[in-house]
Amino acid sequence: MNTCLGQVCPWSHQGHLTTCLWMVAALIQTGVVNLTRWIPYLPCRGQYALA
């Protein structure tokens, strides 16, 4: 996927490409365009706020 989604000029930040690849992989696995459904497939250190 890195080769397919790479650009002619290098990405300005490797983290942007990595995040894009994570999201494409999550989309393929879930088959749904829904960020909340992708959460289990995205490696992330973020936490939800408790209400």
Image (tube, rainbow, N blue to C red):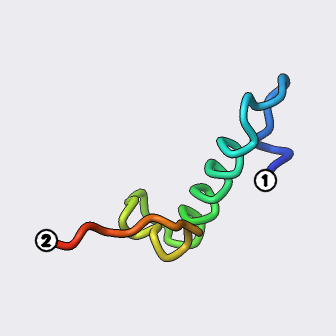
Nearest to the eye among marks 1 and 2: give it: 2
Q: What element carries label 2?
A: loop
Specify the label residue 47 is tagged with: none
* Left or right position of 7 against 18: right
Is tag 1's residue or tag 2's residue first in the polypeptide sequence? 1
Q: Which residue is drawn at 80% across and 44% down?
A: 4
Rate crowding at label 2 as few (under 14), some (14 to 19) or many (20 or more) other CA atoms within 10 Å: few
Q: Is residue 15 above or below residue 38?
A: above
Q: What residue type is labelled 2?
A: Ala
Q: Is residue 11 above or below residue 48?
A: above
At which x and y percent is residue 42? 55, 67
* Left or right position of 4 against 31: right
What residue sits right under mark 2 in the picture? 51
Residue lying farthest to the top in this orientation: 9
Quarter of the view holding residue 24: bottom right
Q: What residue type is labelled 1?
A: Met
Q: Is mark 1 on a helix, strand or loop?
A: loop
Q: What is the distance, in whole Å, between disc 1 and disc 2 at their CAs?
A: 38 Å
Residue lying farthest to the bottom in this orientation: 40
Q: Which of 22 and 31 is in front in this view?
A: 22
At which x and y percent is residue 44? 54, 66
Q: Which residue is drawn at 40% across and 70% down?
A: 37
Q: How many marks?
A: 2
Quarter of the view holding residue 47: bottom left
Q: Which of 26 and 43 is in front in this view?
A: 43
Q: Which residue is drawn at 40% across and 59% down?
A: 35
Q: Which of 32 and 26 is in front in this view?
A: 26
What residue sits right under mark 1 in the picture? 1
Q: Residue at x 57, y 72 (%)?
A: 29
* Left or right position of 6 against 30: right
* Left or right position of 8 against 37: right
At which x and y percent is residue 27? 54, 62
